[in-house]
Amino acid sequence: MNEEGRREPGFDRVIVFDLDDTLYLERRYVESGLKAVGAWAHARLGLEKLGPLMLERFAAGSRTHIFDDSLAALDVVPPPGTIERMLNVYRQHRPDISLEADADHFLRNPPPRTAFAIITDGFLDAQRRKIRALDLYRRGVRLGVCTDCWGRECWKPNPRAYLHLQQFFALPPERFTYIADNPLKDFHAPTVLGWHTVRIARAERLHLNVSGQVIDASKVIENLEQF
């Protein structure tokens, strides 16, 4: 199974999940990526302290410019192209991540005649690697849609991915439920289309507070046991 999937009959309902901070904790991916970059920097640049420092800064709340700021803190002026290479290592590493226990249980025990699918934003290669690392197709996910396959302009809140799933499963909008975490972008399109929406607010989610124009879900839960 891959992002293209294939139409399968016999479903009356589709539960569609976001990926990051919905089925697993995004902070675990960041930590995994920083460790991979740290290992690369140690091997290629001799920077043994960079990996631990980046993890320390992330744990302290840093969310932007971690590569640049950590190098500067070590008084390292990187050669041209180093930051770009670090970004590539981060995005192309094999993620050391796992499903949250409630998500694992939910996927193992699907409601009757219910299909599972994914809609996720983010860089295409990175999101595909996350899906593989979580083994989602073997866990019953019928279709995974990485919005970046159509370009950044089709990331949420663009409705293209939601319409793609409606066409794929050939079911009316009211048979779809979208479970995601970000009210800034996740629920606009499915709300307009007539889907059911659920926001999952995990205690350890990466973005605890959001600001701006939000469209929230019709129901809020802390884990999938409450669905």
Image (spheres, rainbow, N blue to C red):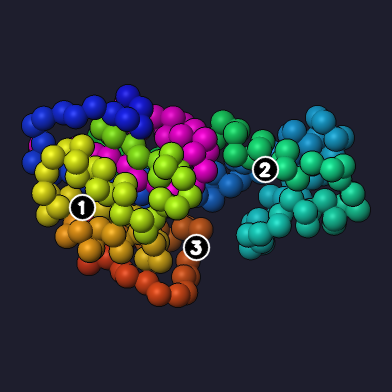
- Marks 3/2: CA distance? 21 Å
Q: Is residue 108 magenta?
A: no
- Marks 1/3: CA distance? 22 Å
Q: Is residue 219 visible from the viewing direction of this image?
A: no
Q: Is residue 113 above or below residue 61?
A: above
Report the quarter where the N terminus lies. Answer: top left
Residue that label 3 marks: 207
Q: Quadrant of residue 180?
A: bottom left
Identify the mark at residue 177; answer none if there is no mark.
1
Label 1 vs 2, first from the N-terminus: 2
Q: Amino acid at mark 3?
A: His
**For the magenta stretch, what is the residue range?**
113-140
Identify the mark at residue 23; answer none if there is no mark.
none
Question: Residue visible at 79% across and 45% down?
Answer: 50
Give the left or right position of residue 12, taking residue 18 as reference. Answer: left
Of 53 and 159, nearer the camera is: 159
Residue that label 2 marks: 87
Find residue 216 and report its horizontal and vertical position in percent.
31, 69
Question: Residue visible at 24% across and 48% down?
Answer: 163
Label 1 vs 3, first from the N-terminus: 1
